[in-house]
Image (cartoon, helix red, strand yellow):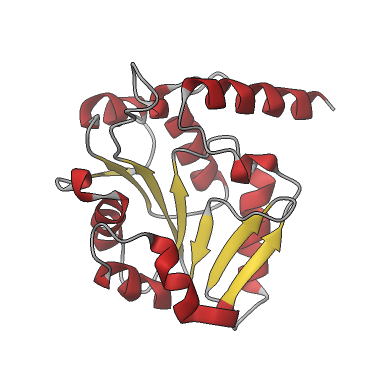
Amino acid sequence: MTDAALVLSAGESRRFGGPPKALAPVDERSAVRRIAETALEVGCFPVVVVVGAHRMPIAHEVRGLEVEIVEAGDWFEGRTASVQAGLRALPEGDDVLFWPVDHPFVSRRTVETLLAVKAHDPLGVWFVPTYLGPGGHPVLWRSVVVPHVLELRTDAPLRSLLPEFGPQVRRVAVDDPGVVANVDTPEAFRDAREAWYRRSEL
């Protein structure tokens, strides 16, 4: 089974202020480029980057990478609308690594762990990384989840589907605070980046 990746970077970044969070520097790369490169490095293909409010600068930022840019024309209707635009661009039957740009400090090892757990768990369909209890992103979906996401209202949260899958939702504990570091504001981004640097130095 092929693992595709859907990198969500369509929002307005209103709370972030200034340039979109996708362009914020993580190391020597921007957030969106690091995510796209990591997805490619672990073997995801195709990798789709969904853009919306800041289409041109984000598309320019991932130039030269083997990714497909998909524009979500209705991004303003809600996050799910942008997710659906990206899913429609993926080959039918692919499993999907769904990675919002709000979580740029996730380690490659965490993504590899999710893929490995899925490979050895034929009954799980929705894999959620957790850190010290709370769940975060990216999540990994088997292809059977995709039609359910496509049927959601554009303003409905993805988590509203979780009860539908019950015990087939697998929580995967990882030693990676990046999965729960949601960088919606410049302050949150700076704090998460400093914590990431500190862990890298250990």
Residue occupying image coordinates x 47% and y 29%: 31
**Left or right position of 181 against 58:** right
Residue drawn at x 59%, y 61% is 128
Give how far across and how far down residue 60 sits, in percent.
Answer: 29, 25
Report the side of 184 relative to 55 (left or right). Answer: right
- Residue situated furthest right in the rendering: 202
Task: State the image coordinates of residue 33 (x, y, percent, origin top left).
Answer: 45, 31
Q: Residue at x 36, y 31 (%)?
A: 62
Instruction: Tell me if residue 19 comes above or below residue 69 in the rendering.
Output: above
Vertical placement of residue 87 versus 169, above or below:
above
In this view of the protein, can residue 107 be seen by the observer?
yes
Q: Is residue 111 above or below residue 198?
A: below
| Residue 95 appears in the rendering | no
The quadrant of the image that shows the C terminus is top right
Which residue is more in the foreground, 5 or 84? 84
Q: Position of residue 150 (x, y in %)?
A: 27, 68
Residue 192: horizontal and vertical position, in percent? Answer: 62, 28
